[in-house]
Image (cartoon, rainbow, N blue to C red):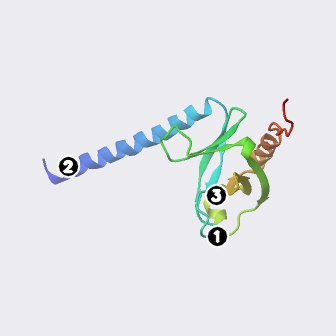
Amino acid sequence: MAWWELLLVVVAALLLLVLAYGIGIAVRRRLLARNGGVFELSHRVRDTSPGRGWVIGIGRYSGDAQLEWFRIFSLSPKPKRVWRRTEMSYISSRSPEGIEELVLYPENLIVTCEANGQHIDLAMDQQTLIGFQAWLESRPMRSTWTVF
């Protein structure tokens, strides 16, 4: 086999792998969406540098109890992060600044929440934020009553 034939086989194999990966991403997104709508949701995984550490992804409400976050370019069917609604609270929202405008989806707002004493930065559009706030506010109230 000549060197150019070997090179052609390698290039064809790489193209097939890229195509298979793209199809896998599309199928995964379709499977995630079948149990309820998914929406664009970015998460700041590292906050050591201002404006950096953002990973784009998709979010999904799982039942009434939790918000699941999936990396957009992963093939894993399991969420990378899960936040329980009863442990989350909304703090504030703001517009992206500096490099955040380039990294995040257009028209996204940065939402700061707290869960289990830790700050969480999420990025979503205005309509998703309204739904997110409604989802958080409609959680069951914690009762301080004791049962005798």
- Disc ID at residue 33: none
The residue pinned by badge 2 equals 6
Q: Nearer the viewer, residue 62 or 23?
A: 62
Quarter-wise, where is residue 82 in the image?
top right
Q: Residue at x 80, y 38 (%)?
A: 139
Q: Nearer the viewer, residue 96 or 63?
A: 63
**Which of pointers 2 and 3 indicates the residue nearer the eye?**
3
- Disc ID at residue 104: 3
Q: Residues within 10 Å of mark 3 (few under 14, many from 20)?
A: many
131 over 45 or under it: above or below: above
Q: Secondary structure at mark 1?
A: loop
Horizontal relation, residue 133 to residue 104: left or right: right
Q: Residues within 10 Å of mark 1 (few under 14, many from 20)?
A: few
The residue pinned by badge 1 equals 50
- Tell me if label 2 and label 3 are in contact, CB under 8 Å: no
Horizontal relation, residue 17 to residue 39: left or right: left
Q: Earlier in the sequence, mark 3 or mark 1?
A: 1
Image location (x, y in percent) of residue 81 = 59, 46
Q: Residue at x 74, y 42 (%)?
A: 86
**Which of pointers 3 and 1 indicates the residue nearer the eye?**
1
Q: Earlier in the sequence, mark 2 or mark 1?
A: 2
**Which of pointers 2 and 1 indicates the residue nearer the eye?**
1
